Amino acid sequence: MHPKLQLMRDSSMLPDPFSDERSDASSPDDTLSQFNMLATKMDLTSQRQHISNLVTDFLQRSDFRAVQSPRDVDLREKLSVDVNNWGVDINPSMLEKMVETSCSYAETAFGHTSFEHRYYIALYTACMLYGEDLGEHDPDAVTQFARRLVRGDKQVSPIFDCLADLLKQAHLYWSDVGADAIITGTVDALTATAIEFATTGTPVAPSALRYPYYLRTRAGGGPQYTHFMFMRSWREKADSYLQILPEIEHWTLGTNDILSFYKEELAGETSNYVHLRADAESISPWDVLRHLTEEVLDTARRIDDITASDPELYALWNRYLQCYLEFSVRTPRYRLRELGIGYGM
């Protein structure tokens, strides 16, 4: 049996891998002072506890188990070499954290795939993290990606040259349906990222109910990461799992919104899905989080039902669920240890 999730009494402060370095001497109160007030009168310490309770409840109801996927040293060494050869002006510690996050994601959620597939996913993730986290400082690289891709032109950034080369190889690793989704999903994700940068601070009109999900599904990379689960060598055609793809995408994006909420509150982000949906529905972000939690748990139950008649597919889905949760809890990126959430030691 796998050890169950345990709450740790460890309040050590871990830096966000893709934000400016913070002082190791920062106190919990210093960190809490960065929280959005969420339009409530709740004090900051209570907010932190409220998020901790919500995340813990979600993990427990997801029957999360500490899978503890093995650390892939070879993957890290290979990705480190390639990333450091990009020749871009990025802080070395940033690159190191980019490598760690990318490899951790590949070796957990996609640990069932071959080394070649995991390396593709890790390198792809590193490129997309650049677009998501650092592209605000290099907007031309993001906004011009699609036009340069279809023209076959050199990209503004060598990182996106690498990404374009990866897209050309997608059909070698995934089904035709999957590879096409990876290519179009990448273009959608970078376009939506540019929109997010351009519309930061723009309020969402009440009753614009579809807009938050519209932006989220494009910016979140759901199609490509969902298809990454299914190697061409596992099943040549996507027919047997097509109907669960939108469900897995919804589960993945919703789970990410729930588990990354604490990190994003610390950064003062209000353009994420939770806040945009709160504005559109004229409710509080807390209400959105509660509703989203129930929606995501319901989606997981429905995927179980859909895959019940296909034991191999059912096992793959449940492995993905457990290992995606493992990644989210394990990675310093989401800072969940600060909430006392992690593996028991």
Image (cartoon, rainbow, N blue to C red):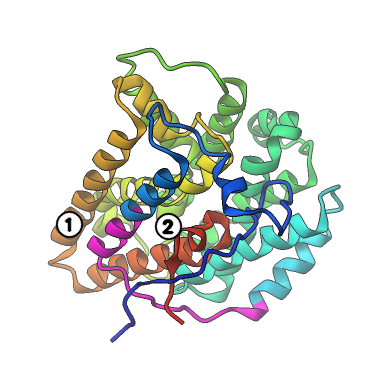
- Specify whether 135 is left or right of 37: right
Who's the residue at 40% across and 53% down the image? 226
Range of the magenta residues? Answer: 55-74
- According to the picture, the residue beneath numbered tag 2 turns out to be 175
Closest to the observer, 217 or 95? 95
Q: Are marks 2 and 1 in contact (CB under 8 Å)?
A: no
The reply, left or right, for residue 56 in relation to residue 149 is left
Q: Quadrant of the N terminus?
A: bottom left
Any magenta on residue 120? Answer: no
Whether residue 277 can be seen here? yes
Query: Of 265 and 135, which appears nearest the observer?
Result: 265
Circle 2: is it few (<14), some (14-19), or many (20+) Cα within 10 Å? many
Q: Quadrant of residue 196?
A: top right
Q: Is residue 303 above or below residue 136?
A: below
Percent position of residue 33, x then y: 57, 40
In the rendered image, which residue does mark 1 sit on?
A: 301
Hey, what amino acid is under mark 1?
Answer: Arg
- Numbered disc 1: secondary structure: helix
Q: Say which of 110 and 333 sits in front.
A: 333
Q: Decide: is 334 above or below 36.
A: below
Amino acid carrying mark 2 in the image: Ser
Name the front one of labels 2 and 1. 1
Work out whether residue 155 or residue 9 is closer to the camera in this orientation and state it.
Answer: 9
Which residue is at 27% across, 58% downward? 57
Is residue 64 covered in magenta?
Answer: yes
- Residue 83 versus residue 108 in the image, above or below: above
- Any part of residue 110 in sight: no
Q: Residue at x 44, y 29 (%)?
A: 215
